Image (cartoon, grey):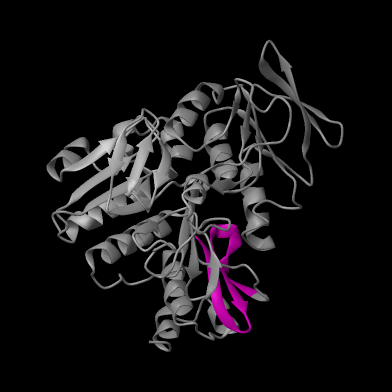
Amino acid sequence: MTDQGVLIIGAGQAGSQVAASLRQGGFDGDITIVGDEPALPYQRPPLSKAYLKGELEEERLYLKPAEWYEAQQVRTITNESVSAVDVKKNTAVTSSGQTLNFDHLVFATGSRNRQLPLEGASLENVFGLRSLKDVDQLRPHVTKGKNLVIIGAGYIGLETAAVASGLGANVTVLELAERVLARVTSPVISAFYTKLHESHGVTITTKTSATSINSSGGAVESITLSDGQILPCDALLIGIGILPNIELAEEAGIACEDGILVDHEARTNIPHVFAAGDCAKRVIQPYNVSGRLESVHNAIEQGKKVAAAIIGKPMPKIDCPWFWSDQYDVKLQIAGLSSGYDNYVTRGAIEDKKFAVFYFKDDVLIAADAINSPPEFMTAKRLILAQAKADPDRLADSAQSLKEIAADFK
């Protein structure tokens, strides 16, 4: 395969994984990664946690050190984007005018923050949280006594609230839905996190939106809410979701629909073109539904699939979707997708910050949220993959052995 070349557009977790898995699999052709940030591929989850706290230096976020790319002969083009792709001529043109040739093309273009449709959303102290630059710019505004307003009570918003309140900022979180994390979890988990944040001094306001961003001297001064209240604001963080970066693929004739459509090998409708990570939409197992997954696990799993398909090796073993979130002294581990659940049970003591919620649909376990409970998380993953009709009452009973429950479905 020495005459084969792989071009990876996107220098995130998925793109880095493709390169690493290709080399691990014995691929000795050319590999080029193009990323629009100055940094080498790095981890994003710590951005809203340890990196915002100042506990991690930039280099410690890198997925691989610079020496690895040199030793593995992986070319990295940083601080540059790809502006056009021709999948018939197998060429790509970068923002600086370079023409790159390829035999296999991988879209690992990730996603971008959804923008708030309000005048003033581009003021100098309005932030998203997606990149190193975002956090570097936000950090000076989350010090003691500063007023930080966060729009969106998803994981990014709540993780940032936890860090900012710990640094002494006055934090208010605004959520349009009736509860925090409403899109992704049950009322039990929502209530737990609301109480947790309020116990640390964070103000959470639901069923509320911002109607105007009020500025002074080119910077945000306050936020007017839908109930007429005006909040002082030294910095505004927008955390209302993300959009997949699919425009470049669409222009190249790749089939897209809220994501770049791929098959079980992460291959698009053009056989030598692949997609992986946040930007890719595929059939999610064991649910047999089409969707995108925005997670480290998904980026790694799909990156491995791309490499296996290019090399011609068997597809890697597939896990059920999983995610995590760290807030204060609480680690949430999520197994599966709870969307569409019709029943749930709780195991453990909520007041001890050590419990799990198991979700069912048509009596089949489809997901679990485990709070400081790794055994419940690991057991849930096994049961979800087995599409187990586990007894809810048995799972809810802490006296019942998880090992024995899981053994029933080997």
Could you tell me which residue is drawn at 54 percent across and 43 percent down?
A: 159
Which quarter of the image is occupied by the C terminus? bottom left
Which is nearer the eye, 20 or 351?
Answer: 20
Which is nearer the eye, 394 or 123?
Answer: 123
What range of the chain is rendered magenta?
344-371
Q: Is residue 348 magenta?
A: yes
Which is nearer the eye, 350 or 280?
Answer: 280
Left or right, residue 217 beside residue 45: right
Residue 45: horizontal and vertical position, in percent? 44, 45
Q: In this view of the protein, can residue 39 be seen by the observer? A: yes
Question: Outermost residue toward the top?
Answer: 217
Rendered image quadrant of residue 221: top right
Which quarter of the image is occupied by the N terminus? bottom left
Could you tell me which residue is drawn at 62 percent across and 51 percent down?
A: 193
Residue 341: horizontal and vertical position, in percent? 64, 73
Above or below residue 328? Residue 105 is below
Rendered image quadrant of residue 78: top left
Question: Outermost residue toward the bottom?
Answer: 408
Please identify the dominant SS of the magenta region.
Answer: strand
Left or right, residue 99 beside residue 139: left
Q: In this view of the protein, can residue 57 be seen by the observer? A: no
Left or right, residue 160 beside residue 95: right
Could you tell me which residue is drawn at 30 percent across and 47 percent down?
A: 7
Residue 216: horizontal and vertical position, in percent? 72, 13
Above or below residue 322? Residue 389 is below
Which is nearer the eye, 31 or 179?
Answer: 31
Q: Is residue 366 magenta?
A: yes
Please state the total of marks drawn on the protein image. Answer: 0
Residue 209: horizontal and vertical position, in percent? 77, 39
Question: Outermost residue toward the right?
Answer: 228
Above or below residue 405? Residue 116 is above
